[in-house]
Image: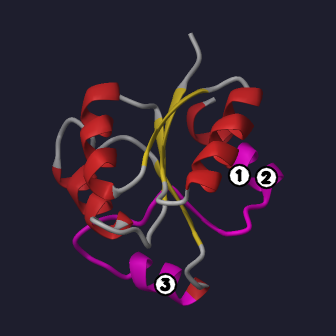
């Protein structure tokens, strides 16, 4: 059975691109358009990995990341942040004491080779 990746991004084109990219690489995918829906899907779908955008309407990726970390059912799922936000934000995230840093961080546009390599490293 293929490993499942939850893609959380408010941009439909990005969700579609990531879904196609991961499915072409042998993974199954499910997606969500914001942190509220994403957190619910993380609990119901039990993904092996989550890609998470930071800047989204309704609920940000940061809030969802905190919720994932605080919930025993989702706290061990590796999270790869994929965002258009600058590298300064990466440094900010990594200094937060409330939650550990994400498993990986990629800026848009995403380096496909590096992303796939990191996903394979994290979940096979």
On screen, 7 above or below 10?
A: above
The residue range painted magenta reads: 88-117
Which of the two labelled residues, at mark 3 and mark 2, occupies the earlier sequence position? Answer: 3
- Pointers 3 and 2 in contact (C-beta within 8 Å): no
The answer to the question of whether label 2 and label 1 lie on touching residues, with beta carbons closer than 8 A, is yes
Q: Which mark is residue 67?
A: none
Question: Residue 84: x percent and y percent?
Answer: 60, 75
Q: Is residue 117 above or below residue 46?
A: below
Circle 2 SS class: helix
Q: Nearer the viewer, residue 96 or 9?
A: 9
Give the residue number, with chain letter if any, for mark 1: 115
Farthest-out residue, front: 12
Q: Reply yes or no: does residue 104 show up in magenta.
A: yes
Q: Earlier in the sequence, mark 3 or mark 1?
A: 3
Residue designated by label 2: 112
Residue 109 lies left or right of residue 105; in this view the side is right
Outermost residue, top side: 1
To which residue does mark 3 refer? 89
Task: Please name the residue shown 49% across and 56% down the image.
Answer: 9
| Total tally of numbered discs in the picture | 3
């Amino acid at each position: 059975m293929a490993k499942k990746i939850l893609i959380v991004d408010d941009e439909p084109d990005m969700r579609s691109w990531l879904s196609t990219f991961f499915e072409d690489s042998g993974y199954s995918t499910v997606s969500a358009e914001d942190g509220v829906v994403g957190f619910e899907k993380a609990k119901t779908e039990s993904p092996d990995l989550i890609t998470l955008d930071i800047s989204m309407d309704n609920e940000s990726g940061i809030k969802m990341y905190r919720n994932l970390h605080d919930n025993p059912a989702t706290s061990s799922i590796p999270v790869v942040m994929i965002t258009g936000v600058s590298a300064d934000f990466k440094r900010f995230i990594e200094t937060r004491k409330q939650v550990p840093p994400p498993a990986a961080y990629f800026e848009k546009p995403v380096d496909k080779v590096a992303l796939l390599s990191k996903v394979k490293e994290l979940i096979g």
